[in-house]
């Protein structure tokens, strides 16, 4: 402590001795600033540009590189191809069609240069005279822009790298980039790039899309008035929008014409005649062609962007060729099946919701829809009371019609996967991508209903149960916590008879499935479902899970069924097989993910064999008697409470396909116990698709699922015993070749028809869903296969 005090005293003495010297030095510095010498002034003046130059040098690495500029000007978007080489999509950065400078009207070029940058051909990216004049005018209160066309191009191409704020840093970055562009490109190349990248509102980029959007013509046919109108928009797209602000746009067009006269690009006499002419806009939004698999392409774009970022590629400029797993023939069959069934069910929905008892302003559900609408919230925000807003919207016929159309629009999701390798073969996310881009394959989570039951039976078989085991069809009451009881039903009283597990699965018995769930355990069923493919959705391990009360995606369910069809081996769905560069050289190949055996082959085959019963004698038998499919297939139907969701998934050795049918709002249904079932709503989509796939021999109708060979010492003994007592082979009699007839004669009227060979598709039959709506609604429910009852509501909230 004493040493510290002594050091502190020494420090104070040192400061006291040097304080006068420091004060004197500070005083001399202040005097120098008050009365600077010539040398100080010169140094200060030289320091300012030096500092500015240093700042510019520091900013150069933070501006786009020359290679990046070359990529943008030679844009080559990624080409998305199917497995059989058909084009599915093209990943453009914007809705733009690139046209060469020779394909653009000379009026456009004259108007652009005369108005935006009349010394364009003379400068090297920066117009110093214009920049200084703009700065002086800005300082005097009249703010003006001094950017050249090259600077504007730099800002349009690289808004993120250059920035948008009106700061010195942004202007310097813009200038540096403009100089780089001028160093790389000729003046004509700069003009071509500018006119093909400039935005014109309404998702129209470039002069070609602008010409189509505003005048229903092409860029090479724009006349001088049309060219002046479009060039005039560049000063402010929204402010001079010819659709919403025609008067401003007309005034701006005439200013552009005046500039053309001033720069010698238009005769004064002609200007006097043109200035009085109207705009004559022929407006139509330009939409990108969605392609045959738009929802698939949308999901693929997200994946490809992440891949390109990791591997330093651009999906817009590097000309990548992406070969997907989609089969264009199967995709076309899926699109057709969704279209046909969607239209048929929409007629039924329109008839059901067209009744006043279903849709009228005083119906509680309709009023709920009104209160949830943006129009209702906007009315409340403007000060209307809840009652006034409700009354106004109820009286608005256009609003009510649009609301009804939105809420009662049938939607369908469809997915097909090759179970052997996980290749996605067909993907349809909705009935119409342009009307509803929401993907009902990957994004939508809905209750799967009875399509979840195979996980319960699969867990039971894994634990040693057999399809021949029996349970009593009886009332079930399961405590789910506290005093709450869950009582699943099948829509009618239980029979009291015993049923085999195979028959219970085929007939989709809720009471039997609930009892089985109690025996095997909900947690184990949930774990098995996750292992088999339901890996993204949350599954609640409660008794009602047996009847599919936890929402899942169609992609997860089809993937899980693929595990069954692949002998218990899970394969992650695969979208891309390989990526090539623009010259066809392979950049990366993608094979199936590592196989995961989640069920023993014998257990998987037992489950699949039981699900054959669904098709042969159960709720899915329309696959046989209506669509004539004789191939070896298995599957499951599914219907949720109040018929809100209809499901059907079908398995073949080469292909697993599933469909979901419903409305975006789960409160809306087909209002029919018949058409709301998965056997009548979703099954026809898959049946139609599979029938076409089999007929085209894309899927081999002769392939069959085979039971795995037994292993172990007991299996070897049984094989030895069969071989020991096997009968001697008998030579087949020689077959005589039948002579070829000139032409087949007519079959005798009483001749029996040839029996249908198993494994071969039957001739096409009639499709009652394509008949008139009145015939559809009168069609008898008899002979359509057994009803699949939806799960009864859980009496315990926690069991839902």
Image (cartoon, helix red, strand yellow):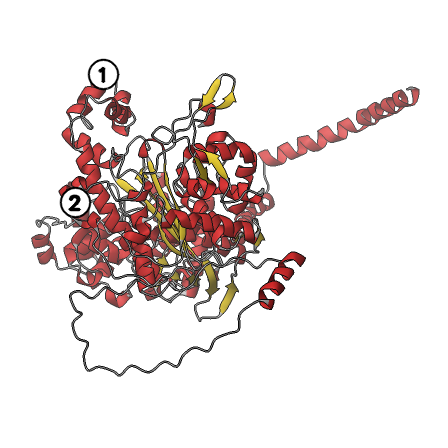
Q: CA distance from mark 1 to mark 2?
A: 46 Å
Q: Position of residue 520 (x, y in %)?
A: 55, 36
Total marks shown come to 2
Circle 1 residue = 387
Circle 2 residue = 251
Q: Quadrant of the N terminus?
A: top right
Q: Position of residue 211 (x, y in %)?
A: 21, 55
Q: Quadrant of residue 20?
A: top right
Front residue of 293/45: it is: 293
Residue 282 shows in the view: yes
Q: Look at 50% across and 46% down and name the residue there.
A: 533
Please report contact status of discs 1 and 2: CB closer than 8 Å, yes or no: no
Residue 445 shows in the view: no
Query: Is residue 68 left or right of 364 when viewed as pictured?
Result: right
The correct choice, above or below, for 698 with respect to 541 in the image is below
Q: Count residues near mark 1 (Cα–Cα under 10 Å), then give few for <14, some for 14-19, many for 20+.
A: few
**Mark 2: secondary structure:** helix
Task: Please give the label number shown on residue 555.
Answer: none
**Mark 1: secondary structure:** helix
Q: Position of residue 279 (x, y in %)?
A: 13, 49
């Amino acid at each position: 402590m004493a040493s510290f005090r002594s050091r502190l005293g020494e420090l104070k003495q040192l400061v006291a001795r040097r304080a006068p010297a420091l004060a004197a030095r500070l005083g001399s510095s202040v005097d120098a600033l008050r009365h600077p010498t010539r040398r100080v002034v010169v140094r200060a003046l030289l320091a300012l540009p030096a500092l500015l130059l240093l700042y510019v040098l520091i900013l150069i690495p933070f501006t786009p590189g020359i290679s990046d500029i070359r990529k943008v000007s030679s844009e080559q978007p990624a080409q998305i191809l199917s497995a059989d080489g058909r084009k599915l999509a093209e990943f453009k950065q914007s809705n733009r069609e690139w046209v060469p400078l020779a394909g653009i009207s000379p009026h456009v070029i004259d108007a652009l240069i005369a108005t935006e940058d009349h010394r364009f051909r003379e400068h090297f990216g920066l117009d110093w005279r214009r920049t200084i004049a703009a700065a002086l005018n800005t300082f005097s209160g009249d703010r003006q822009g001094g950017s050249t066309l090259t600077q504007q191009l730099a800002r349009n191409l690289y808004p993120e790298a250059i920035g948008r704020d009106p700061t010195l840093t942004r202007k310097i970055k813009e200038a540096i980039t403009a100089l780089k562009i001028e160093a790389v490109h000729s003046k004509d190349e700069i003009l071509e790039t500018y006119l093909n990248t400039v935005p014109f509102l309404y998702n129209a980029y470039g002069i070609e899309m602008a010409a189509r959007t505003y005048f229903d013509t092409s860029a090479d046919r724009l006349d001088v008035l049309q060219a002046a109108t479009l060039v005039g928009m560049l000063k402010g797209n929204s402010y001079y929008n010819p659709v919403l602000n025609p008067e401003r746009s007309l005034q701006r067009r005439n200013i552009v014409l005046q500039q053309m006269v001033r720069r010698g690009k238009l005769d004064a006499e002609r200007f006097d005649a043109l200035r009085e002419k109207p705009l004559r806009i022929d407006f139509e939004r330009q939409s990108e062609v969605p392609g045959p698999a738009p929802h698939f392409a949308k999901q693929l774009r997200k994946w490809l962007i992440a891949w390109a970022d990791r591997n330093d590629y651009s999906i817009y400029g590097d000309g990548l060729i992406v070969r997907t797993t989609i089969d264009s023939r199967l995709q076309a069959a899926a699109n057709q099946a969704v279209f046909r069934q969607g239209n048929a069910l929409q007629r039924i929905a329109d008839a059901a919701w067209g009744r006043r008892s279903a849709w009228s302003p005083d119906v509680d559900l309709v009023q709920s829809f009104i209160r949830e609408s943006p129009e209702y919230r906007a009315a409340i925000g403007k000060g209307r009371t809840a009652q006034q807003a409700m009354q106004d919207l109820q009286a608005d016929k256009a609003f009510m019609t649009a609301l009804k159309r939105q809420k009662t629009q049938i939607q369908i999701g469809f997915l097909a996967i090759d179970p052997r390798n996980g290749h996605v073969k067909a993907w349809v996310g909705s009935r119409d991508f342009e009307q509803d881009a929401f993907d009902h394959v990957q994004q939508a989570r809905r209750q799967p209903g009875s399509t979840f039951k195979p996980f319960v039976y699969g867990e039971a078989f894994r634990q040693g149960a057999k399809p021949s085991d029996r349970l009593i069809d009886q009332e079930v009451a399961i405590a789910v916590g506290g005093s709450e009881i869950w009582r699943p039903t099948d829509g009618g009283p239980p029979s009291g008879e015993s049923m085999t597990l195979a028959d219970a699965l085929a007939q989709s018995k809720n009471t039997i499935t609930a009892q089985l769930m109690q025996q095997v355990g909900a947690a184990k069923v949930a774990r098995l479902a996750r292992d088999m493919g339901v890996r993204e959705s949350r599954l609640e391990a409660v008794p009602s899970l047996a009847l599919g009360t936890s929402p899942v995606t169609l992609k997860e369910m089809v993937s899980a069924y693929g595990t069954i069809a692949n002998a218990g081996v899970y394969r992650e769905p695969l979208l891309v097989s390989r990526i090539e560069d623009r010259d066809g050289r392979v950049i990366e190949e993608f094979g199936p993910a590592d196989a995961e055996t989640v069920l023993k082959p014998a257990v998987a085959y037992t489950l699949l064999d039981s699900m054959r019963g669904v098709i042969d004698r159960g709720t899915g038998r329309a696959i046989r008697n209506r669509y004539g499919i004789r191939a070896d297939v298995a599957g499951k139907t599914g219907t949720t409470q109040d018929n809100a969701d209809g499901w059907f998934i079908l398995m073949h050795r080469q292909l697993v396909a599933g469909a979901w049918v419903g409305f975006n709002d789960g409160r809306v249904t087909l209002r029919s116990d018949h058409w709301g079932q998965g056997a009548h709503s979703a099954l026809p989509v898959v049946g139609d698709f599979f029938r076409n796939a089999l007929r085209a021999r894309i899927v081999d109708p002769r392939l069959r699922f085979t039971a795995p060979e037994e292993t172990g010492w007991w299996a070897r003994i049984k094989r030895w015993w069969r071989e020991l007592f096997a009968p001697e082979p008998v030579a087949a009699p020689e077959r005589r070749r039948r002579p070829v007839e000139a032409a087949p004669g007519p079959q005798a009227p009483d001749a029996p028809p040839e029996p249908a060979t198993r494994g071969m598709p039957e001739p096409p039959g009639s499709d009652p869903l394509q008949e008139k709506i009145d015939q559809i609604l009168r069609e008898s429910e008899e002979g359509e296969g057994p009803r699949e009852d939806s799960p009864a509501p859980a009496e315990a909230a926690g069991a839902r």
